[in-house]
Each structure stands twice: as C-alpha cells, then as structure tokens.
Amino acid sequence: MNQPQDVDGPRRGRPPQAWSSAAERAKGAFSKLDVRETVRRYPYAAIAVASGVGVVVGATLGSRLVRMLIGSVGMFTVSELLRRYAQRALDDLVELEMETEEPADEPR
C-alpha cells in the first residue's frame, strides 16, 4: 500500500520553536536594515528591486483608467475635506453671531 503524502511537506514536522526563532532572526535583520549598506553589498539585487518597482509604478501611472481612478478619488477627497472645513467655519460663524446678539428687552 502507498503511504499518503503530506500536503504541507517538511514544514509539518518542524517544532514551533524553530519557526519562532527564524521569525525573531528575520525581525532583527529587518530592524537593522541600512539601505546604503544593502545597496553596496547587493547591487544587482538593488537594481532588480528598483526595476520591479519602476515597472509596477510605470504600468500603474501609464494606464489611463488607473490615472482617472486615482484622480477621481483624489478630487472627491479634497472636495469632501473642503466641504467639511467650510461647514465647520459656517457653524462657528453662526455660533459667534448668536453669542454677540443682544436679547431684546421688550417685545414689540
């Protein structure tokens, strides 16, 4: 009879301590990341990463549909912020007018 294969592969048998120590080492490496030193040590990897980022940004900004979407969201956000600012300014102005008005002494 054939034995069923592990779907998860060799990771399944590893103890949790091995994974947590690997995660701690990776966290320590990223916290000490110096971009200048990394580029000096690994220039080809830095060029590859920069090229990949450039391709993604270029494809994003090169698309008319994406530019239109980004512009629409930006314009909506700015208009909402300005509307709320204007509403708050008008509310403050109305409160100021109500505070400065003198109450009538005698009804007419």
Image (spheres, helix red, strand yellow):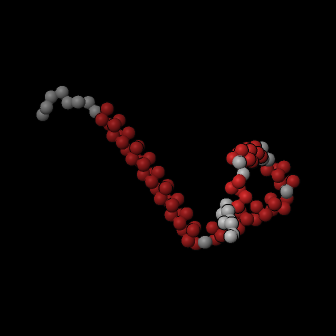
Asked whether residue 41 appears in the rendered view, the answer is yes
Front-most of residues 21 and 79 = 21
Asked whether residue 57 appears in the rendered view, the answer is no
In the rendered image, the residue lying farthest to the left is 108
Front-most of residues 69 and 35 = 35
Q: As displayed, is residue 82 above or below residue 57?
A: above
Residue 2 drawn at (x, y percent): 69, 69
Residue 11 drawn at (x, y percent): 71, 56
* Number of numbered discs overlaid on the protein picture: 0
Q: As displayed, is residue 63 above or below residue 82?
A: below
Q: Is residue 72 left or right of residue 59?
A: left
Residue at left offset 84%, top offset 49%: 37
Residue at left offset 76%, top offset 45%: 25
Residue at left offset 47%, top offset 59%: 76
Which image quadrant is residue 17 in? top right
Residue at left offset 51%, top offset 61%: 73
In the rendered image, the residue lying farthest to the top is 105
